[in-house]
Image: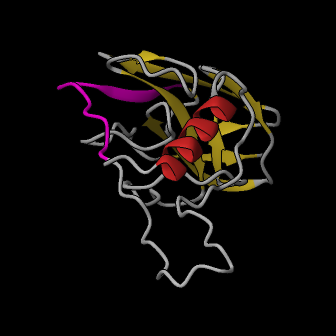
Amino acid sequence: MIRPDLAIGTLALALCLCGCGEKPAPVADKPAQSETSNEAAMPPVVRARTASPEGARVFFITPADGDTVSNPIDIEFGIDVMTVAKAGDNQPDSGHHHLLIDTDLPDLGAPVPADAKHVHFGDGSTRTEITLDPGQHTLQLLLADHLHIPHDPPVVSEVITITVE
């Protein structure tokens, strides 16, 4: 049985993300509990992850691992086997990029966080410019589906290390 309160919340999230290109605030996937309700709080909803096709991969076109760069840093993303689609656009074998900066992979069963270390490209971008403090930094790409949830199996790039002058 589909719970209307969760279906509406999911629809609202999808509409918010649809082509907006903005970084969405983290959204708890738990219905609000009425102050007059004696029901126990419901556990978070577990969503099935979207399958990724065999051979799917994301990678950095620029910069390359080991590059020394200066600000602003031009970053271009590549993708094979799948296509890039805007957040909220549920097309087969598609997703949108997330740039992970100086961090490990997030929980692969939940939406990718939106913060300074997890930069969303829900607008379908495949190129960006960023500014980082001087020193060494790690970068990694993670593709996620229309709801910002990583695919199964995950489509991730190798971690690259760059030095910012």
Q: Is residue 2 left or right of residue 31?
A: left
Q: How is the image coloured?
A: secondary structure
User: Could one spot residue 66 in this view of the protein?
Assistant: no
At 48% across and 80% down in the image, what residue appears? 39
At 70% across and 54% down in the image, what residue appears? 115
| Magenta-span inclusion, residue 152 | no
Q: Is residue 118 left or right of residue 74?
A: left
Nearer the observer, 51 or 32: 32
Q: Is residue 154 left or right of residue 87?
A: left
The percent position of residue 157, horizontal first and vertical second, equals 40, 38
Task: Please give the range of residues in magenta.
Answer: 48-61
The percent position of residue 66, horizontal first and vertical second, equals 53, 42
Above or below, comparing residue 97 to residue 109 in the picture: above
Q: How many numbered marks are there?
A: 0
- Examine the image and state in which quarter residue 54 appears: top left
At 50% across and 38% down in the image, what residue appears? 147
Above or below, comparing residue 81 to residue 39 in the picture: above
The percent position of residue 25, horizontal first and vertical second, equals 71, 51
| Magenta-span inclusion, residue 53 | yes
At 46% across and 82% down in the image, what residue appears? 40
